[in-house]
Structure formats: C-alpha cells, structure tokens
C-alpha cells in the first residue's frame, strides 16, 4: 500500500509539473458571451415565470483540458429573487473516441428571502462519443443538498447533436429525469435547432416539456427562442 501511495504521489506530481509548464507556455484562454431568450428554462422548468431572460458569462480554458467559468441571468421565483449566478470548473479528458466531462457547479441566487436555502452545489460526470453524423452523450449530476434544501438529488440525461450538411444549422436534443426526495421527481425533454449567422452570433429555437404539468405552469410545454453573441 505504501508503494502504491508513493507511485500515485509521484504520478500526480509529474502531471502537476507538466501542467504548470504548459500553463506558463500558453496561459488561459478566455471567451465571453451575452444573449437573451423569451424564457429561461432549466431542465424543463421556467426560471423567469415565463418571461424574458438576459444572460452573460465568461469561460476560461486551460491546457486544452481544464475549464472554469461564471454565468449570470435574471430569474423570477415570485419570492423576490433577482438573479442567478453560476460558478463552475472542470476537466475534459479524452480516451480514444470518448470525451469525458468532470465538473463541479455552484448555483447562487441574489435577493433570496431568508430561510429559502436556494443556493446549492452539484457534481457532474458526462461523456460523449461521435456516431456517424451524430454526437451522442450521457450525463449525471449529483447534489448532496438540492435547491430549497430538499435533500439529495440526481439528474440523469441522454442527449444528441448533429450538424446539417452544407448548412449553418445544427439539431440537438435531450431526455432527462430529475430525482428529488419527496414527490418532486419529474421527466423532461427538449429538441431544438440552432443557426450560426456568423462565428460569433447564433440563434436557437427549442421545444421544452415535462411530464408533470400538474406541478404548475412553469412545468408546462413551451417554445423558447433566443440569440447569443460570443467574443
């Protein structure tokens, strides 16, 4: 066991020194984005009470494998919460044809009333693989204490994307299931079309739905369209 620990420590140290050298050579790369939608939908649920959303973010990539970023958007939960801010970091190692995505997220909410306990963390494990003209993926998110302090929660998803040949269109979609303690579980799905006007300006129109319309109007089916500018 001691020999194994020494070997692992040496391996980690080697990767750390190699990563530090690479970081000094290239440094982080930054990308920014701003945009707007007629609704902000997260896992099938409207976060803006079916109203307009405006968002923006920054992403940094490191050594072609690591990334970190921040993202903000207005929200409306009917309790005074003004906006959401997300912080995240992860790595995307590649093994053969499979690209993995291992990350941690923090979701924070400004203006939340005392005792609402809306902020929470999630961990992510995902993988994607090319399959002919498609990219197929699967992901799992785990939170030890979910939004509203509702206990452990797991979200699982399968997804796909494909580019339309000889065009600027892409088609993608996802099928997911959110598990939360109590009677809050629900299934969700979406499918949409994206269009790249330029290398920096894109549009997306998407249909969202869940299998629990009885939870309220924000769980209902909806079509969301938006524009996004990256620079």
Image (cartoon, rainbow, N blue to C red):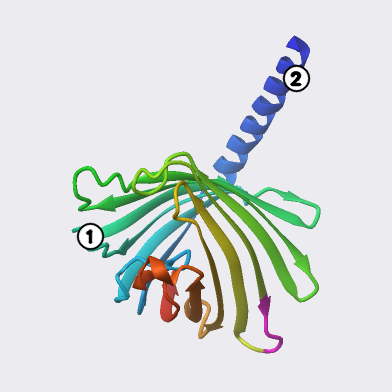
Name the residue tied to disc 1. 82
Taking depth in this image into account, of 180 and 94 the one nearest to the observer is: 180
First in sequence, mark 1 or 2: give its number: 2
Q: Quadrant of the C terminus?
A: bottom left
Dividing the picture into quadrants, the one containing residue 128 is bottom right
Q: Residue at horizontal 36%, vertical 75%?
A: 39
Q: Quadrant of the N terminus?
A: top right
Residue 27 in view in this figure? no
Q: Main secondary structure of the magenta part?
A: loop
- In the displayed structure, does residue 3 sit left or right of residue 120? right
User: Which disc, if any, is residue 52?
Assistant: none
Q: Position of residue 140 (x, y in %)?
A: 60, 51
**Is 126 drawn above or below residue 7 in the view shown?**
below
Taking depth in this image into account, of 20 and 52 the one nearest to the observer is: 52
Residue 194 in view in this figure? yes
Taking depth in this image into account, of 178 and 123 the one nearest to the observer is: 178
Name the residue tied to disc 2. 7
Q: Which residues are magenta?
A: 162-166
Q: Residue at horizontal 58%, vertical 44%?
A: 25
**Is 29 drawn above or below residue 41 in the view shown?**
above
Dividing the picture into quadrants, the one containing residue 230 is bottom left
Q: Position of residue 129 (x, y in %)?
A: 74, 61
Total numbered circles: 2
């Amino acid at each position: 066991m001691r020999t194994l620990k020494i070997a692992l420590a040496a391996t980690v140290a080697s990767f750390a020194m190699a990563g530090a050298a690479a970081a000094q050579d290239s440094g982080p790369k930054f990308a920014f984005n701003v945009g707007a939608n007629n609704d902000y939908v997260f896992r099938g649920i409207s976060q803006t009470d079916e109203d307009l959303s405006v968002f923006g973010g920054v992403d940094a990539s490191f050594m072609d494998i690591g990334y970190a970023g921040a993202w903000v958007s207005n929200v409306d939960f009917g309790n005074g919460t003004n906006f959401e801010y997300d912080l995240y970091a992860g790595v995307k190692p590649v093994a053969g044809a499979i690209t993995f995505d291992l990350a941690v997220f923090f979701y924070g909410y400004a203006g939340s009333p005392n005792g609402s306990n809306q902020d929470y963390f999630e961990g992510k494990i995902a993988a994607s693989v090319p399959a002919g003209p498609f990219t197929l993926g699967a992901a799992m998110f785990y939170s030890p204490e979910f939004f509203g302090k509702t206990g452990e929660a797991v979200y699982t998803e399968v997804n796909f994307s494909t580019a339309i040949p000889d065009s600027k269109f892409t088609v993608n979609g996802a099928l997911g299931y959110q598990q939360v303690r109590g009677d809050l579980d629900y299934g969700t799905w979406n499918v949409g079309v994206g269009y790249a006007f330029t290398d920096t300006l894109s549009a997306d129109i998407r249909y969202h739905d869940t299998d629990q319309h009885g939870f309220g109007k924000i769980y209902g089916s909806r079509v969301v369209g938006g524009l996004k500018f990256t620079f």
